[in-house]
Image (cartoon, rainbow, N blue to C red):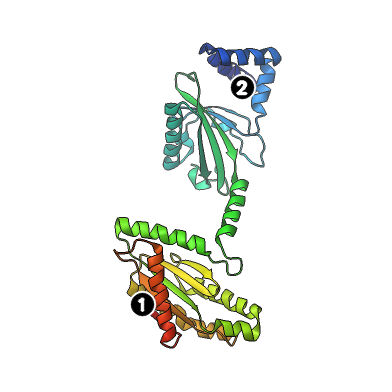
Amino acid sequence: MWQHKWREAFACRICAGLLSRGRSRVASLYEKVGSVFTQQQLSAILYSLPDPAFILTRSGRYAAVFGGKDVRHYHDGSGLVGRTMSEMLKDEKARWFAGEIEKALQSGVLHIVEYELRGSDVKGAGDGPSHSIWFEGRVKALDFQVDGEDAVVWIASNITDRNEVQQKLRQLSETDALTGLYIRRKLLETLDDRLAIFEREQTQTSVLIFDLDHFKSLNDALGHHAGDAALVEIARLCRQHLRQSDVIARFGGDEFVVVMPGTHRAEALEIAERLRENVPISLEETVRYASTISGGISEFGSPDRSSNEILARADAGMYQSKRAGRNRVSAL
């Protein structure tokens, strides 16, 4: 009962605070609302908001919580009232929220931010979510003080499902359907990013290009299904023998490109040789053709001004390997 009366009283304080600002449009709006709804009904409306609305003071105190009662999407926030973020959240997360509150107070305009909340962000074992939850926060400074402090209303919308869908769509748009490796466009974006880092910090990166020897013979003799099986096996071997930091892409047909951050040419050659040595044994278990690879390696250099220059050198190295008899990797 006391919580119900407290919500009614706070709803009235919000209305009264806005009216006291003397803003005719806002005052007119709330006069109209007041003529249609009773105090109890206004409280019920706030209570029924689909997403939780937090009244947060500049010092990080939870002054009030309205709505967000759907337990499928939200935890009950009523127990937060009167507590501070520094009491409830780990220091780093509490500081982040404080910073976003300050941005909203300083700007005076609607502030929109997406953020993740994990169980490890919450103080007290078992008090936080069991898995990561993503929210969209819509934050706006209030035109009146709450208990002597500037304050904001922070509406938190659970966007976890939306983020998961977006992530899946992004993954589909960036990966090759057959091999699960990145596609050409994603690889070029990565290469451009690494080149920018190299120009700024001189952090070395090497690039490997390779393809399957006699791949056309495989397709002609056994059909495209056998060729597809070989490509899938190559992708598996890349994941097994290359490093987690390496970015692997199917560049087109049977051609693959690997971007190796923080790697000089000599080290890249060792990594590529390890992959090459494992290809014949693995592929011979499934197909009789295309059991070797030929590749070329290039590393970033000060004259490089585009990713095309780097790829061209690696490509030249691959064709040098072809001319030398295949089943080898050449570094230029």
Along the line of sight, the residue nearer the viewer: 81 or 54: 54
- Residue positioned 65% across, 81% down in the render: 223
- Residue positioned 61% across, 69% down in the render: 178
**Which amino acid, by three-letter code, is at mark 1?**
Ala
Quadrant location of the N terminus in the rendered image: top right
Give the mark nearest the N terminus, 1 or 2.
2
Quadrant location of the C terminus in the rendered image: bottom left
**Which amino acid, by three-letter code, is at mark 2?**
Arg
Q: Mark 2 points at which residue?
A: 7
Rendering quarter of residue 265: bottom left
Where is residue 161 drawn, in percent x and y? 62, 47
Above or below, comparing residue 54 to residue 22 in the picture: below
Along the line of sight, the residue nearer the viewer: 35 or 166: 166
Where is residue 147 drawn, in percent x and y? 48, 19
Residue 271 visible in image: no
Above or below, comparing residue 79 to residue 135 in the picture: above
Where is residue 275 drawn, in percent x and y? 46, 78
Pointers 1 and 2 in contact (C-beta within 8 Å): no
Rendering quarter of residue 270: bottom left
Q: Under tag 1, what secondary structure? A: strand
Q: Under tag 2, what secondary structure? A: helix
The label number, if any, that marks residue 331 in the structure image = 1
Question: Is residue 45 shown left or right of residue 55?
Answer: right
Where is residue 224 drawn, in percent x and y? 64, 78
